[in-house]
Image: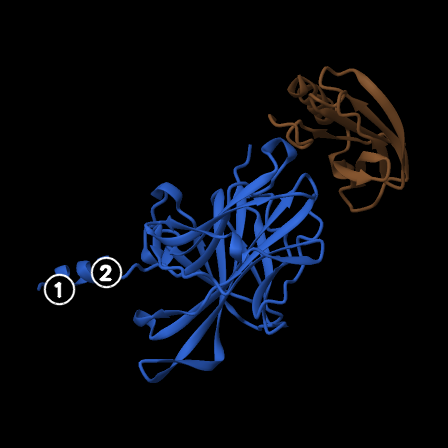
Amino acid sequence: MIRTALAALLALALAGPAWAHRVNVFASVQDAEAGEEVVVEAKFSTGRIPALGEVVVEDAAGTVLATYPLEDGAARFPLDRAAAAGGLSITVRTDDDHEGYWLLTPADLGEGGS
Amino acid sequence: MSRLALIAALLAAAPAAAHYGMIIPSDAMLSQEDGRSVDLTVSFSHPFEEDGMILERPEAFTVTHAGETTDLLGDLSEATVMDAPGFTLTYDVERPGAHIFAMTPVPYWEPAEDAFIQHFTKVVVPAYGDDEGWDAELGLRTEIEPLTKPFGLWAGNVFQGIVKLEGEPVPYAEVEVEFYNEGQAATAPSELMITQTIKADADGVFTYAAPNPGWWGFAALNTAPETMEQDGEAKAVELGAVIWVRFEEWQ
């Protein structure tokens, strides 16, 4: 299912207008005081950080689980391992309409599989 | 022995190609769809002829990312590469950005050249759509500082770099260029075209346009001021700054 989401997102990315200023997205799981959290980082190909935007989190079926604000190129949210069991698709849309994504696969989450 | 047979025997015994330290990654530009690791094949070879030589465990093998250099020497696994001893390594790529893998080999005694050869070798692998740090200088004794991103090039593009020795540009440095002829798909009409030689300009800048997709090795060669002893005699030490650059097929 996560591959379906990947294909759809890739199609969107390819249809997008601005490879020259694409936004690169990376997400990782880090330990936090209140448990684990997903840390999302975004930056343009120029190295500059997008000031504002939103982060859309979907599960492997493509269901939107949550949206978060992107501030200074970053966002953090708690990791719900039950909801993320099949992996998470994390899309960043900047206020100037650039878009990129990162897939946290089950392997990235230490769940086995890929 | 006839003159013809003598020439044939000499040709068979001594490849006309140049020596190259080689670090060839399994993926020239790692995307998230490619996975989370890259496999490296490390050797000392004649790349056009796929003729391997013995590569001893290097003095140093590192990766530099975001200004931090990590020792990977202990992660090298012995392997046979081009029918000769070499190494492999699987590196887990944890963060986006350019990862510069570098090897400092132990000097190799080459009787045919009556000299030692030490090739400081590197390759740059960008990860997850981010190439920041691609032009970082590692501070190797001799090094090619790329002026062109050393990946993401079309065949036919030019690659430019600055030859540096002890941190300083080398005017009119000699740079050998050779194609990694995997599968022996390419043939050269003349031995002179197996290894091409170009010279840098007065600022140590060289330029080369690769005619074919694949991995191309650039080796800038200088002679060390010091000598090393072999059989009780002082011998010259060739210092090579090597970088491997991938050119892609136009699609």
- Hey, what amino acid is under mark 2? Ala
Chain identity of mark 2: B
Residue B9 falls in which quadrant of the image? bottom left
Identify the chain drawn in brown.
A
Left or right of residue A69, residue B204 in this image: left
Q: Which of the two discs, 1 and 2, labels the residue nearer the N terminus?
A: 1
User: Position of B150 compared to B220: left or right?
Assistant: right
Frontmost residue, A105 versus A5: A105
> With respect to residue B66, does B110 lie above or below?
below
Are discs 1 and 2 less than 8 Å apart at CB?
Answer: no
Picture layout, residue B207 above or below residue B211:
below
Res. A18 image quadrant: top right
User: What's the distance in space between the residues labelled 1 and 2, CA to CA?
Assistant: 15 Å
The residue pinned by badge 2 equals: B13
The residue singled out by tag 1 in the image is B3
Chain identifier of the blue chain = B
- Quadrant (top left, top right, bottom left, bottom right) of the N terminus of chain B: bottom left
Which disc, if any, is residue B53? none
The residue at 79%/39% (across/down) is A31
Q: Residue at x 44, y 52 (%)?
A: B87
Q: Is residue B237 left or right of residue B92?
A: left
Q: Residue at x 70, y 19 (%)?
A: A5
